[in-house]
Amino acid sequence: MSANGLRALDRSTSGGSSLETKYRSDAARAKKELNAIKRNRSSKKAAAKSRRSAPQDPTLKIAKQLSELRTALARVDRKIAELEASDLGGDRDRQLAALRARRAGFELGIARRRAKQ
């Protein structure tokens, strides 16, 4: 029989000592209090999260997106320049084609957002 089974058998016959019962109930009470605190914390986190994800001013959102797209475009331009300066090779041509396609996508995104402003 497992240790838990022996303890359960012992408790069923003796009812357990009053001290043991007291500690068990204290532990249960402490666990309930801890869970309540955790529940309160998680509800506060959810409220803070909903405030953070609240809808922004559309013009600010578009301006932020434009800024991020311009940064990404500058990064791609730099990578293209580095690749063009590197040695010739089949892999280089494939990478250049992929980067140019990505650059076109960023430019299209910038144009779309400018049209929204």
Image (cartoon, rainbow, N blue to C red):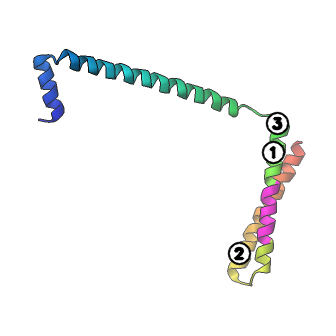
Task: Specify the segment rendered in magenta.
Answer: 70-80
Give the mark nearer the N terminus: 3 vs 2. Answer: 3
Residue 4 place in picture, x, y as percent: 18, 31
Q: Nearer the viewer, residue 101 or 80?
A: 80
Q: Quadrant of the C terminus?
A: top right
Q: Left or right of 23: which side holds 117?
A: right
**Rendered position, 33 above or below 88:** above
Instruction: Please name the predominant secondary structure of the magenta segment in the image.
Output: helix
Query: On the image, numbered disc 2 is attached to which residue?
Result: 94
> Can residue 104 be seen?
no
Residue 116 place in picture, x, y as percent: 87, 43
Query: Image quarter for residue 98?
Result: bottom right
For label 2, the SS is helix
Residue in the image at 30% along x and 18% along y: 25
Label 2 packing within 10 angstroms: few (<14), some (14-19), many (20+):
few
Say the numbered circle drawn on residue 58. Answer: 3
Whether the residues at callouts 1 and 3 have beta carbons within 8 Å, the answer is: no
For label 3, the SS is helix
Q: Left or right of 65: which side holds 91?
A: left
Query: Image quarter for residue 20?
Result: top left
For label 1, the SS is helix
Q: Amino acid at mark 3?
A: Pro
> Is residue 92 magenta-colored?
no
Closer to the camera: disc 1 or disc 2?
1
Residue in the image at 59% along x and 26% along y: 44
Q: Amino acid at mark 2?
A: Arg
Query: On the image, numbered disc 1 is attached to which residue?
Result: 64
Name, please, the residue furthest toward the bottom.
88
Q: Left or right of 18: which side holds 117?
A: right
